[in-house]
Image (spheres, rainbow, N blue to C red):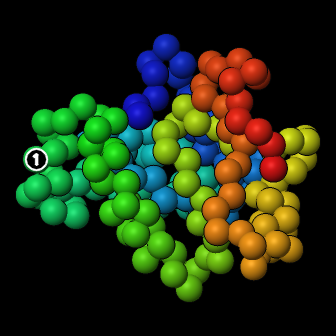
Amino acid sequence: TRPCPQFPGVFRRWVEHYVGVLGVGRMVVYDMDATLGGYVAELPAELRGKVEYVANFPEQVAPTPFGELSRTLPSKACKLALELQIYNHCLDTLAGVAEWALQAYTVDEWLVPPRAGQTVGDLVRVVEERRAAVVFAEIPRCNFCATEAEWTPGW
C-alpha cells in the first residue's frame, strides 16, 4: 500500500514504530510497483540501515506471469497472488540471520502491544515458552485510522 499523500511522513513513522517501539531488528519491505523507493531513501540513516528494500518484487520473481499480474490485477489481488512467494523470499533472505519472521502486510497496518513498552521480543518470549504448541500466532494490530474497537485481540 502506498502511503497516503494526506498523511506525510506515515512511512517513516511506520518504520520508527516497528524498529523503535516494537524493537524489530530488521525489516524487509516488498514493493509491488517500485513506488516506495523514495520513502525508503528519505529515511534517516539509522532507520534505513534496518530496512532492506525489494523494489518491484513481481518483476524480480518472474516477469511472466507475476510481473504481468502486478500490472493487470488490482493491488490487493496481486498481493494475494504473490503472498507465498514474498513470504518464502523473506524466510530465505533471513535464514541464519533471524530466529523469527513477522509479517505486516501494508504500511497502514500497525502492530499494537497490549501494554505500553512491550516489544516484539516480549511476544517471542511468550511464544517460545509454548513453542511445542505454537504454529501460528495472531498479533494485535490496528489499521491506520481504525478505531480501537476494530483492533484485533492482544497477545
Q: Position of residue 29 (x, y in %)?
A: 45, 53
Between 104 and 80, the residue placed more toward the observer is: 80
Q: Quadrant of residue 62?
A: bottom left
Residue under pointer 1: 68
Q: Position of residue 77 (x, y in %)?
A: 29, 38
Q: Quadrant of residue 137?
A: bottom right
Residue pictured at 65% horizontal, 20% vertical: 146
Residue pictured at 55% horizontal, 32% vertical: 108
Check the image and name the residue furthest to the front: 133
* Amino acid type, residue under disc 1 in the picture: Glu
Quadrant of image for the N terminus:
top left
Q: Is residue 67 among what the camera can see?
A: yes
Q: Is residue 149 left or right of residue 104?
A: right
- Does residue 24 lie above or below 74 as drawn? below
Check the image and name the residue furthest to the top: 6
Q: Is residue 50 left or right of residue 57?
A: right
Between 10 and 61, the residue placed more toward the observer is: 61
Q: Is residue 3 left or right of residue 118?
A: left
Q: Position of residue 127 (x, y in %)?
A: 78, 67
Residue pictured at 76% horizontal, 51% vertical: 22
Q: Quadrant of residue 131?
A: bottom right
- Does residue 87 lie above or below 37 as drawn? below
Label 1 Cα neighbours within 10 Å, binned few <14 / some 14-19 / many ≥20: some
Residue pictured at 85% horizontal, 60% vertical: 122
Check the image and name the residue furthest to the bottom: 96
Q: Is residue 55 among what the camera can see?
A: no
